[in-house]
Image (cartoon, rainbow, N blue to C red):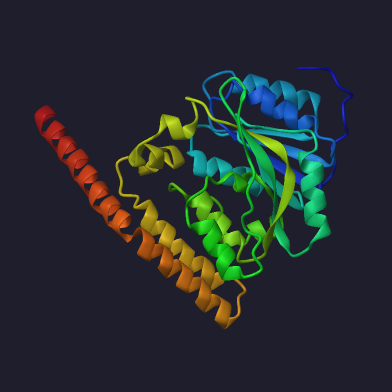
Amino acid sequence: MSERPRPKAAAQAMVSVGLPVYNGQKYLAMAIESVLAQTFADFELVISDNGSTDATQEICEAYAARDPRIRYLRQPQNCGAGFNYNFVFHEARGQYFKWLAHDDWLAPDNLKASVAALESDPSTVLAYTHHIDVDADGVEIRAVRRTKGQNEDISKRFWDLMEGSYTCEEVFGLIRSAILRKTPLIANYTDSDRTLLGELVLYGKFAEVREPLFYHRIHAGSSVRQNPVFHQRAAWFDPKLKGRLVLSAWRQFFQMLRAILNAPLDLRTRAACYWQALRWFKWRWRWMFEQLFGELWHYLRLNLKRLGTGRATS
């Protein structure tokens, strides 16, 4: 860790960066350093350690002791990724909020450019920069440039975010905290980040910063690679879901309907958004029923196995 002058803690920073982490010792310091190196200094960094068993705690405590803008909070046990992502937001005090995964990092001007984008247009709810995908060693794989959530037609931008042909790095954009509080945040099922993005565009457009100021690491130790099967990923989101039915696509569909109902939309726009939700269902229904029967089969096999084990030991 390089030496730098000790900054002063702000009573309430303009930007809160939330960093949820579990056993992140390999890349964590780089993520923290990238936040501390921001040219926009009016921020707080909220770190929630989900009961790590590696050197994560020692790394976080060392940084927190040196910089009062860092608040380090530790969970007594691993409560799941969904809980941890939402926890850092509940602890945040800033006008704007940004999630940062422990294995990603920010370019120095990320916060400055994102704040400027939101400040220049009050109708926007989220600002995201172009990003660069990198490998485990930080070597560039590809630059990702795209435009999502900018259509003036609310129902069309809702579809753009829900249709599913893109990864969801926009969730790591800078978000207006007041709008984010109106949502259920990250739910405990796969693709809930996409549903959150779809709900956010019902409140306003996304602002695009046309510079690659975010680095997204793709590596073997990532959550997606470590939990490739639906029931594994469900338990990663919430350990209480291990061995239970999740039905993520069905939950996603019904959360879409609730989001449209709760958003401040006129009757015509609300009807158009419901039409897009039905369009999504028509596009995905075969896969949804495959998921339903696949999860039921997995659930029955698991519980029959438990029943057989219980009888054998009794």
Q: Is residue 60 visible?
A: no
The image shows residue 222 at horizontal and vertical percentages of 50, 30
Where is the C terminus found, in terms of image quarters? top left
Q: From the viewer's perspective, tell me whether residue 24 is left or right of residue 243.
A: right
Q: From the viewer's perspective, tell me whether residue 303 is left or right of residue 151.
A: left
Q: Please, is residue 172 above or below residue 3 in the view?
A: below
Q: Is residue 81 visible?
A: yes
Could you say which is closer to the camera, residue 127 or residue 2?
A: 127
The image shows residue 59 at horizontal and vertical percentages of 66, 21
Q: Please, is residue 311 above or below residue 85 in the view?
A: above
**Total marks drawn?**
0
Q: Please, is residue 91 above or below residue 122 in the view?
A: above
Could you say which is closer to the camera, residue 42 or residue 202?
A: 202
Q: From the viewer's perspective, tell me whether residue 61 is left or right of residue 189.
A: right
The image shows residue 262 at horizontal and vertical percentages of 55, 71
Residue under the point 80% across and 24% down:
66
Residue under the point 66% across and 68% down:
152
Where is the N terminus found, in terms of image quarters? top right
Q: Please, is residue 169 above or below residue 73 in the view?
A: below
Could you say which is closer to the camera, residue 306 or residue 173?
A: 173
Which quarter of the figure has residue 156?
bottom right
Which residue is situated farthest in the bottom direction here? 267
Residue under the point 60% across and 76% down:
265
The image shows residue 71 at horizontal and vertical percentages of 72, 35
Residue under the point 63% across and 25% down:
28
